[in-house]
């Protein structure tokens, strides 16, 4: 059962996931760079984030992977780059479950795969990561829609309180 959702607070996948988590009534948060640094300025106060010791994005990325039970990477393709690729490397390095999915695939088969992964890995604290909005325009809205579908279709007993 997903008990908490975390991300890095960046535009794009991070905020889309946080917004869906808030809508679903889940506790949300995660690590963000010192100064609440994001590509659009400061991460809004609506997102309850913890600041890392530096303003380095990779420090925040690794902390979120390390402190969660597993990471769901949402992307527009399977070719991961930049911080998204680093997220997958950190998951391997910390021996944490990691699932990469296309953000635009909300099919029943994709939702079933995500549910099975969540259950098999006993994911309580879910880290959601992926590209920022500037590198993948529209990904924030797509992420929020997919995460809504995930939460709404969770088998009973796994839904947020």
Image (tube, grey):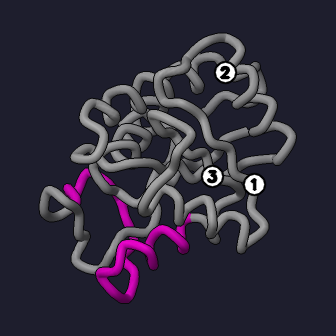
Mark 2 residue crowding within 10 angstroms, few (<14) / some (14–19) / many (20+):
some
Disc 1 vs disc 3: Cβ atoms closer than 8 Å?
yes
User: Which of disc 3 and disc 1 is earlier in sequence?
Assistant: 3
Q: Residues within 10 Å of mark 3 (few under 14, many from 20)?
A: many
Percent position of residue 146, x then y: 49, 24
- Which residue position is annotated with label 3? 71
Quadrant for the N terminus in the image:
top right
Residue at the location (42% across, 61% down)? 82
For image coordinates 39% across by 43% down, the residue present is 13
Q: Residue furthest bottom?
A: 53
Tell me the residue that label 2 is attached to.
Answer: 110
User: Badge 1 is on which residue?
Assistant: 97
Mark 2 or mark 1, which has the lower sequence index?
1
Above or below for 32 versus 4: below
**Whole-number angstrom distance, CA of label 1 to CA of label 3:** 6 Å
Q: Give x and y (percent) for residue 149.
A: 53, 19
Measure the alpha-carbon separation of dots 2 and 1: 17 Å
């Amino acid at each position: 059962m997903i008990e908490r959702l975390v991300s890095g607070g960046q535009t794009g996948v991070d905020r889309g996931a946080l917004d869906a988590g808030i809508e679903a009534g889940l506790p949300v948060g995660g690590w963000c760079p010192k100064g609440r640094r994001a590509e659009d300025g400061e991460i809004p106060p609506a997102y309850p984030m913890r600041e890392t010791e530096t303003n380095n994005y990779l420090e925040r990325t690794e902390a979120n992977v390390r402190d969660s039970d597993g990471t769901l990477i949402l992307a527009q393709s399977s070719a991961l780059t930049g911080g998204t690729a680093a997220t997958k490397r950190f998951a391997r390095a910390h021996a944490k479950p990691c699932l990469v999915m296309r953000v635009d695939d909300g099919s029943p088969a994709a939702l079933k795969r995500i549910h099975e992964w969540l259950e098999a890995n006993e994911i309580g604290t879910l880290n959601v990561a992926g590209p920022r909005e500037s590198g993948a325009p529209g990904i924030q809205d797509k992420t929020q829609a997919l995460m809504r579908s995930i939460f709404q279709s969770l088998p009973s007993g796994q839904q947020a309180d």
